[in-house]
Amino acid sequence: MDAKARDLNQIFDSTISFQIPLFQRPYVWQEEHNWVPLWEDIQGLMDHRLRTQKSRTHFLGAVVLEQMRNVAGSIETHQVIDGQQRFTTLQIFMIAARDICHQFESGKYYERFADLVGNKASKVDFEHERYKVWPTNSDREAFKLVHGVGGLEALEQRLQEQPKLHEQNQQVIDGYRYFYCQLALWLHGELDEEPGEQASDIDERLDALWQVVSNALQVVVINLSDDDESQVIFETLNARGTQLLPADLIKNYLFRRAQSEGQDIESLYEQHWKAFDAKFWRKEVKQGRTKRPRIDLFLQHYLALMLREDVRSAHLFEAFKEYVVALEEGDKGFQLTAQPNSIESHLQSLSRYARSFRKFAEPEAGSRLALFLDRLQAVDTATVYPLLLLACDQLLPADRTEFDRVLVVLESFLVRRMICCMTTKNYNRLFIDVIKSLDKRGKINAQVLQEALQANEGDSVRFPTDEELRHSIVKTPIYKHLAQYKIRAVLEAIDLAQEDRKSEVLTLPRNLTIEHIMPVKWQANWSMPEDVAADPEKRLAFNQERNRQLHTLGNLTLITGSLNPSLSNASWGQKRPELCKYSKLNLNRYFHPPKEVEPDPLLEWSEAAIECRGQELYQTAKSVWPYQIAGS
């Protein structure tokens, strides 16, 4: 058995044929689970190439091949024992890339990609040997179609003219469609995070595409010898097992180098790595829609901080190696993070920042950090963790007060943007840029962080003002724009801030539900003025305004789930006493009858009352999430 890492140019550029045998399953990869992650990895590599003019290698997995005796054909032929889904997908992608190059009239890159997906007619004896990969039987007609059609428009025309072609393997056809469209969008710059931020020249983008496909994408090719039992190996590779994590590869890399340098690796392990082998770090935790081992998340945030760039989860090992090599070649690093200059110092640095990261997983009960992390779940972003790592490392334990002030600034920025329904799309780049800004100042504290955040302009990055916050709370039908768990977090924070010395401190249960005080179905018990009801135009305008206002924050509160059914569509005369009787929340003290004001202004719950309460909630929210932190 021979195993070597090879790039796609090394695998496919020669006159060669990879055949997928009959007994293999057909092509089944799909968009969500397979094509999208692969495309995101490739796009990340191409974007990196455009920004830096450097290629970052990316490991795509392994394929197992068995060389066939050359009796049926004239060229070198291998049977694909394992990895046929990956090989087929790569060929579909490169076929799409070839056809895209033809669309842009780039003969040079068209020929290069053509050499990776097909053998020259003069070199083969049989028709199927023209294809670098010859799929299993059920996929062949669809594969031949996309291989020879020449472009997406021609494909759609063929499918329209010959409806029976739809009966071929749809996954092969849909895969071609997907990659062709993504490539076209990327080449036109439409997938850039910020329009115009990268090179717009088509030749530069085509070159980046070629460099990534030919040199950056790598596959471990395992060639079986005559003595290897292909079926046993196939079963072993596909058996259930524990997957190697990027941390395992990094550990191997660091300790092998330490050993070659004659260092005491047992001592290094005990001092700096042993903790990483505990269950705590390998536990899978949820981030976004997926679960990942905690150590993967730490490494991603650590590398983003140390490199000052966004690092994709699939590139952790490669990015770490590049980081080590860059420092060895004289890269001085950055002012606020001590840059390691030896294998031992790399281990020390990992261990040091891991201690900070562990505080985020196990915050002290009742601390400002615990409150911040709880509210961060509502914002639903992990992009702030590199900045948190920096703040924690620089400020704790010496200056906990300043660290807590940093959390207030960061929370104010994030929650204000959430309440104002602003995008989180560019947060990864934003917080890397903020760290760079702090680098220039040479320090991190609440004041400089606030200045760095408020210096940003544009809807995707700016710090919402008090007036914007007020308008979103008082005027915006926020219930229609934000998920309920986000609104619940805002109301819970306001409720906490409304505590006074006379009210008991409550730990809010997690089963509180959001209640519209004026119900969504208000028509039965919440009448409109008679003069409005009699005029169709006034009635329409009244309905529109009421339906907008009842979804604003001023008309929303929290109640227990058991109370909800009896309140839902009741009149204000019935609903108000129930709120006052059963709810102990500070939010709902607002509805208690005032003792000094006559007449009671809340005898009627109207649009004016909603706006008045909205103004009060805004005043509290402004103090919880200030635009200017006290003392700045």
Image: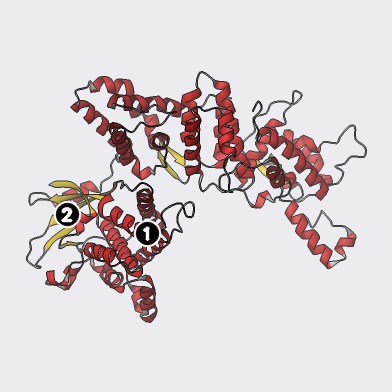
Task: Tell me if 556 is positioned left or right of 398 in this view.
Answer: right
Q: Can you give x and y, in whole percent of width and height, for residue 631 in the image?
A: 65, 25
Say if residue 512 shows up in the picture. Answer: yes
Query: What residue is disc 1 on?
Result: 30
Which image quarter: residue 11? Answer: bottom left
Q: Amino acid at mark 2?
A: Leu
Q: Decide if residue 361 is in sight here.
A: no
Disc 1 on helix, strand or loop?
loop
As measured in the structure, the alpha-carbon distance from the residue carrying label 1 to the one carrying label 2 is 24 Å
User: Of label 1 and label 2, which has the lower sequence position?
Assistant: 1
Q: Quadrant of the C terminus?
A: top right
Residue 132 vs 42, above or below: the answer is: below
Q: Is residue 67 above or below residue 156?
A: above
Residue 129 % position (x, y): 16, 68
Q: Which residue shows up at 39% across the image and 52% down it?
A: 40
**Picture coordinates of residue 88 (x, y %)?**
27, 60
Image quarter of residue 562: top right
- Foreground of the two, 535 or 429: 429
Check disc 2 and report its element: helix, strand or loop: strand
| Amino acid at circle 1 | Gln
Q: Residues within 10 Å of mark 1 (few under 14, many from 20)?
A: few
Q: Nearer the viewer, residue 597 or 616?
A: 616
Labelled disc at residue 284: none
Identified at 39% across, 42% down, the residue is 311
- Check disc 2: other Cα within 10 Å, few if <14, some if 14-19, many if 20+: many
Indicate which disc residue 65 carries: 2
**Most distant residue in the right direction:** 598
Instruction: Kindly check if marks 1 and 2 are in contact, taking CB atoms under 8 A apart as contact.
Output: no
Tally of marks: 2
